[in-house]
Image: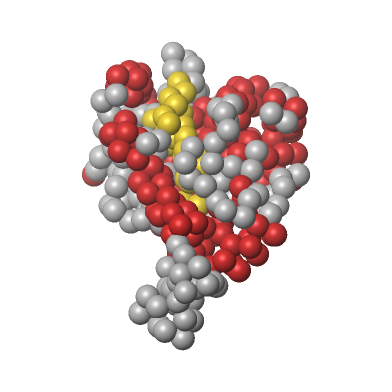
Amino acid sequence: MDQAITAPGLERFARLAKTAPGPDEAAARAVRARQANLTKPPGSLGRLEEIAEWLAAWQGREMPAADRVLVAIFAGNHGVAARGVSAYPAEVTVQMVANFSAGGAAINQLARAFGLALKVVPLDLARPTQDFTLTSAMSEEQCAQAMECGAQTLDDEIDLLCIGEMGIGNTTAAAALFHALFGGEAAAWVGPGTGVQGPALQAKVEVVDAAARRARQASGPGEMPPLEALRQLGGREIAAMAGAILAARHRRVPVLVDGFVATSAAAVVHRMAPGAIDHCLVGHLSAEPAHERAVRAIGKRPLLSLDMRLGEGSGAALAVAVAKAAVATHCGMATFESAAVSRESGAGS
């Protein structure tokens, strides 16, 4: 791995965002040329054609692949959970990590169904982040360590990375991050998460509003830098996902982002440098109400919309099926010449 990725300190990750390599334009042109010669009307496979080009451009090869896919689930605990912002207690994070390891969670079944590698990364679960209504969630060192842990997850050669998370209280952290990064009212970013409603939901809004106000004051005048927002309001699992996104860019690995919480990690990277998440697609639109707004804020369009709000990388894992379909059609279809089909025959109509 690049030495800059393994070096400590948030400033290293800031530099990674600013020095991110661009797409392989030659590979993208080759994909477009092949698409124009496949036995189908131009553009008839819609977004599958776009995905094939996206994969090729970021993998740096003319014929994209989606054989070696890793789903990385990062788990973290949040001090703010003590304020009752979740329908479940904080110990559920540890219990669900055990469930992942035992193969009993939804993501285990999806990974098995689609032939995906699964890696679960617990992040100091015995030591939750600080209650960010009172102080910063993490120190600079803790935030950098979590980002580094995410970056180190890409220790094997893979074609595609899916990022997901587990952490009681983390929709509160994600909402606070979106509020700090993109503004608006706190209520516009807060949803039920694990199922909070009524007074509990209003209390969650108040927590997010108070946390964002405290973080802005701590950050000083002017716009809060994205890594400072992450340190002040995020969680270890969100920081790890941000680190994984940056490492993937330097490793030329395209990324499928899961739902609301995973998108908050992508939003941090998005604000770090122009085009920093061009190698990412959002796998699905979560049923968490603010996710659609969040996806628009980072300039993305989800691949799927199935009313899911589970986390665990589940929506991103399902979107792998779409990526595999894009690869299969692009690489496997015959050309007009090889199939001896006339371009004027109306093939595929």
Q: Quadrant of the C terminus?
A: bottom left
From where the camera sits, is residue 59 visible? yes
Q: Residue at x 50, y 52 (%)?
A: 281
Number of numbered labels in the structure image: 0
Q: Position of residue 3 (x, y in %)?
A: 75, 27
- Position of 346 with respect to 56 (left or right) is left
Relative height, residue 85 to residue 299 (above, below): above
Q: Position of residue 243 (x, y in %)?
A: 60, 34
Snapshot quadrant of residue 116: top left
Q: Position of residue 232 (x, y in %)?
A: 57, 33
- Position of 229 with respect to 2 (left or right) is left
Relative height, residue 304 to residue 102 (above, below): below
Q: Position of residue 302 (x, y in %)?
A: 43, 57
Q: Residue at x 48, y 45 (%)?
A: 66
Snapshot quadrant of residue 98: top left
Q: Residue at x 36, y 56 (%)?
A: 304
Q: Residue at x 62, y 55 (%)?
A: 62
From where the camera sits, is residue 180 visible? no
Looking at this view, name the residue that lies furthest to the bottom: 344
Looking at this view, name the residue that lies furthest to the top: 126
- Position of 56 with respect to 348 (left or right) is right
Please name the colour scheme applied to the rendered image. secondary structure
Q: Nearer the viewer, residue 83 or 336?
A: 336
Q: Quadrant of the N terminus?
A: top right
Q: Nearer the viewer, residue 283 or 293?
A: 283
